[in-house]
Amino acid sequence: MTRRHVPWLLLALLVLIQICYPLTTGDTRARLTVATVVLGYLLSVGHALLTRGPRTAAALVAVATGGGFAIEALGVATGFPFGSYDYSGELGPKLAGVPLIIPLAWTWMAWPAWLAAVRLTTPAGRTPGTLTPGGHVGRVALATVGLAGWDLFLDPQMVAEGYWVWRDATPALPGLPGIPVSNYLGWLLFAVLLMSALRPLAGPAVAVTDSRDDPMFALYLWTYFSSVLAHAVFLRLPASALWGAVGMAVVAVPLAVTLLRARRRPAGRPAPARTGVDTPA
């Protein structure tokens, strides 16, 4: 097995665990939740390390994991920026009131959301690092929505399981009681800070993509489509299935279309020049 196969293996294990999740209950489901987050974290950080080197992996951990813990600790202590909430004890050990796996979850999905935004904002046939109109601001905005849209699935699911609870859940989105709108605004705020900091800290290697990023694109699309199915059918959360389907589609649908078009290019037709990730970190 080569280094290129490692992310695919971790992704396969992640998919297997997530398939098992709706088939379990109680403590078993909580343990699977923890295992999913840890495996997703190893997948994203490991992919960053293998494809772009120590600088990028360290920046991802510093910004997403370190920043994720800091914003969660602030949120638990003050209610800003998400609203007032408390974590139960079902997600493992806590520090400053925050389960240690929570910052790992931020990291797990931040990396594929960033790479998806890079893929969508790099015109085919252009030199590496070239951006579509809107430039870096547009890329950060797309990555922000790509990450924050995931929470339209995540929070309703975790609240339904009792993993955290809001002290004041008003106003809430239609069909999603128990979660204030301030939570989603807080996600947008932190996501834009995270994505804005990642590029300058991680270096030029994160501004381009190539085929080695396919496992991360697969992770993002699997998360989207499997979440819609799971919420609509297995978890009996139809409202979050709808909200998440709409919110995360802003990135997931264009990404799926872009990747399908690239695969369907007629044989013998030269492919447009694609960007690579060989730029030294």
Image: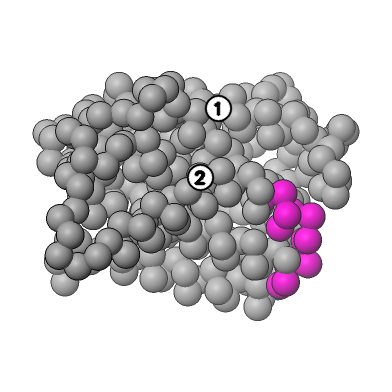
Q: Is residue 218 visible?
A: yes
Q: Give how far across and how far down residue 54 sits, in percent.
A: 20, 38
Residue drawn at x 15%, y 55% as measured from the top left: 270
Percent x, y of residue 239: 79, 55
Q: What's the CA distance linking mark 2 and mark 1?
A: 18 Å
Instruction: Report x, y in % for residue 72.
Output: 60, 32
Residue 110 drawn above or below residue 5: above
Q: Position of residue 195 (x, y in %)?
A: 43, 29
Q: Is residue 275 left or right of residue 25?
A: left
Q: Is residue 207 left or right of residue 114?
A: left
Q: Which residue is drawn at the image coordinates 84% and 38% (left, top)?
A: 172
Of the numbered discs 2 and 1, the one sitting upstream in the chain is 1
Image point 65% across, 78% down: which residue?
23
Secondary element type, mark 2? helix
Residue 139 vs 162, above or below: the answer is: above
**Within the magenta stretch, is there residue 138?**
no
Q: Quadrant of residue 199?
A: top left
Label of residue 190 in the image = 1
Q: Which one is nearer the viewer's eye here, 167 or 53?
A: 53
Q: Relative to 52, is 199 on the left or the right? A: right
Q: Which residue is pictured at 59% across the width and 53% down the height?
A: 92
Report the magenta residues as a range.
233-244
Circle 1: residue type = Phe
Question: Does residue 234 show up magenta in the picture?
Answer: yes
Location of the C terminus by quadrant is top left
Select label 2 or label 1 by which is in front: 2
Q: Which residue is mark 2?
A: 251
Tell me the crowding category of disc 1: few under 14, some 14 to 19, or many 20 or more residues within 10 angstroms, Cα based: many
The secondary element bearing badge 1 is classed as: helix
Amino acid at pointer 2 = Val
> Residue 201 is drawn in which quadrant?
top left
Residue 225, picture quadrant: bottom right
